Image (spheres, rainbow, N blue to C red):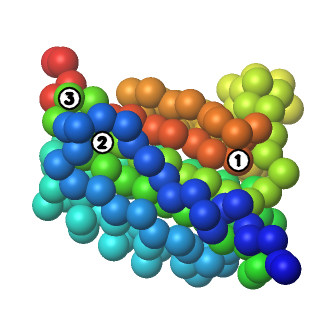
Amino acid sequence: MKQQNEFELRPCEFMGSNLTWSVDIVVASTVEAISPVVDQLMQSLKTSCCTPEQEIAVEMALREALANAIVHGNHEDLHKKVRVCCACDAKRGMLIAVKDQGEGFDPSKIPSPLAGQSILSEHGRGIYLINLLMDEVQFRNGGTEIRMRKDLHPTR
C-alpha cells in the first residue's frame, strides 16, 4: 500500500476561536503561480481584514514567502506543492502560513543583506523584508514553514 504524503494530510490550523475568516490552498511549485495566488489571496484579505495601510506590507511579505517556498524550498519541482493558509483573528490579526515540501533550512544561518558581500548579492533579501514588514515571523518544521502575523490595529 502506498504511503500518503504527510503534506497532503496536514492542512494549516490556526488555534483559537476568534477566527472571522480563513482560507487554505495548495499551489503548484512554479514561479508563474505566484502572482495569481497572491492576487487572489489579497482580494480576499482586503474584504475580510486587511486595511489599506497594511495591503502593501502584507502583499510583499506573502509574495516573498511564496517565492521562497517555490524557488528555494521546492526548487520548482512540479511534483511538490506549497500550502498557503491565511486567516483573520479578531484578537491576533492577520495570520499567514506558507509550507513547502523542501528540505528546510536554518534561518539563523542566512546572512544579513546589510553586511559584507551580501550587500552586492542579487538574492537574500526576502526573509529580511518579511521580518521588516510583518509584526511577527516564525519558522517551523525545520524551516519548511513560515508563519507571519500582522496586527489588525497597529499602535500608532
Q: Is residue 89 above or below residue 8?
A: above
Q: Which residue is mark 1?
A: 144
Density class for disc 2 (Cα within 10 Å; few <14, some 14-19, many ≥20) is many
As drawn, which residue projects farthest toward the top? 156
**Disc 1 residue crowd, few under 14, some 14–19, many 20+, Cα 10 Å:** many
Q: Quadrant of the N terminus?
A: bottom right
Q: Looking at the image, how many numbered discs can be counted on the residues?
A: 3
Q: Dot 1: what SS?
A: loop
Residue 94 tag number: 2
> Mark 1 or mark 2: which comes first in sequence?
2
**Would residue 68 be found to the left or right of residue 119 on screen?**
left
Viewer-side residue, 35 vs 75: 75
Q: Amino acid at mark 1?
A: Thr
Residue 149 drawn at (x, y percent): 39, 35
- Compute the Cα span from label 1 to label 2: 20 Å
* Residue on which the image places disc 3: 91
Q: Residue at x 31, y 50 (%)?
A: 87
Q: Quadrant of residue 90?
A: top left
* Image location of residue 55, percent across then percent down: 27, 50
